[in-house]
Amino acid sequence: MPFSNEDISINPRDSSRCPIIIIDFGSQYTQLIARRLRELEVYAEILPCTADIRAVLAKKPAGVILSGGPASVSSRGAPRLPEGLLESGLPILGICYGMQLLALLHGGRVTRAKKREYGHAEVSVTGEDPLFAGLSRTLKVWMSHGDGAERLGNGFKVLARTDAAPYAAIGDREKRWYGVQFHPEVAHTPEGARLLENFARRICGHEERWTMSSFLEDSVRRIRAQVGEGRVVCALSGGVDSSVTAALLARAVGKNLSCIYVDTGLGRLGDREFVREAFGRLGVKVKIADASALFLRRLAGVRDPERKRKIIGRSFISVFEGEAKRIRGARFLAQGTLYPDVIESLSVHGPSALIKSHHNVGGLPKRMKLELVEPLRALFKDEVRRLGAELDLPETLLGRHPFPGPGLAVRILGSVTKESLDLLRRADAIFQEELRSRGHYDKVWQAFAVLLPVKTVGVMGDERTHDQVIALRSVQSTDGMTADWSPLPHDLLARASSRIVSEVRGVNRVVYDITSKPPGTIEWQ
């Protein structure tokens, strides 16, 4: 039987307009906590465990969630809480490592568990508490831990247990401190979202409903407060991120927006024309800056992907800066930077690894005199599409597959030349055409072609060939943080392969990438 839904909330102060702050200890699931809360219309932000308490309190949080993490709380150098957090009076929910740390710092004892728990488990709820209001007495959960609480400190009571974990959930109702050994944020814990909602609503008193409509209104206010009467220059690529950024800025500042499309020569087939036509219909003027020759010259002979990204980033900024200087009164630069870009580029959330750099994250030169405006910096990709729908953008824009900032340069595994770009563009266009003709373009999250740095032997027209290889990639994802490869129909792949080999001179072999993220990334570089 589930608990009663009667209101047993704890709401000592007005926290309705305050976020839930997630302190990251390096868990692979940290982003999922934020996503689950946002899906519940509770706004959440992630801060690293190294954050100063002043940075935490500056957010005016309604409560704090401590993520899991790979470390052992008893090991030397293990991450700790921001100093002063326990004295802040804020409600706290610790998950896995976060629970163990909370128990340890509250006078308990944490040791290596006699039996490691990993995978599905059943938790028996032992007492009534607002954290478990409306949940089943026996919960199916996901466990992933080798340590466990052996003894609780003063104030904590056992709220749930398993056969292997006698302290599967603990709580100090007076202090509003809670801990769960399992992971409520993952899909393998079916009632986990309800538990997170209970923490946010009943324990933290978070009443405001965070929606895309409210985000839109708040963003417009923030942009106007930041920009004032200044002119904003927007870097427009025609992708979903920059398109939504431009539309949002148009809503906020109107005629004080100037959009510039820097033609790097690294875009998809027809990108330039698509941008001009699409934004023309929206009434947004776009200045086209053709810098393709410059980018090709600077990328000549460069094979390392990180060097490519840095060269492209610096070149993009220099070209854009030059164009912006021609716009009278330009003071602000708008970019479509997203949350995953920030997470993967800067490694700011806990002791996690740098995956790759992004040319539009943290790469602005000190000399640049334009102040940065990044209104989508807190959003995941699917949230950006929802915001675009709120802005009434057409599906032709919102439905476009993600495209990397450095363009085709990071889909050419080797030196970038005009010939390799033309070859890859034609192969990619064929793949897109076949996906659309079979009704699969809108069924997958992202699909593209990659030019490999190898040549293989083939036979075409009774002649021996020694030509290049195209890899096709298609994935399913929600936000780009994780992804599964798409099991496309074999006849679709066969048709795409046949057309690429037949129509793209210089290619004699096509392969299909069936790697998920992790262990791979979506892009090859």
Image (spheres, helix red, strand yellow):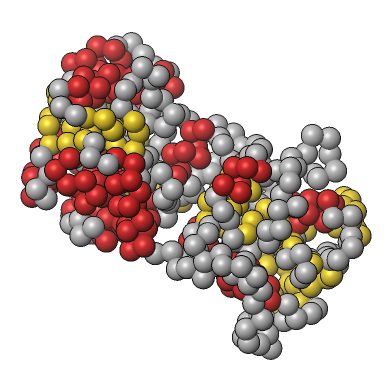
Q: Position of residue 371 (x, y in %)?
A: 34, 31
Q: Can residue 113 be spotted in the picture?
A: no
What residue is at 35 percent from the left and 48 percent from the top? 222
Q: Nearer the viewer, residue 44 or 125?
A: 44
Q: Quadrant of residue 214?
A: bottom left
What residue is at 64 percent from the left and 77 percent from the top? 9
Q: Quadrant of residue 8?
A: bottom right
Image position of 299 with respect to 221: above or below = above
Q: Can residue 19 be spotted in the picture?
A: yes
Q: Nearer the viewer, residue 193 or 410?
A: 193
Image position of 90 with respect to 305: above or below = below
In the image, taking residue 156 as reference, residue 38 lies left or right, namely left
In the image, taking residue 28 as reference, residue 251 lies left or right, namely left
In the image, taking residue 211 as reference, residue 284 lies left or right, namely left
Q: Position of residue 277 (x, y in %)?
A: 8, 44
The quarter in which the C terminus is drawn is top left
Q: Position of residue 125 (x, y in %)?
A: 76, 77
What residue is at 55 percent from the left and 41 percent from the top? 519
The quarter in which the N terminus is drawn is bottom right
In the image, taking residue 23 as reference, residue 251 lies left or right, namely left
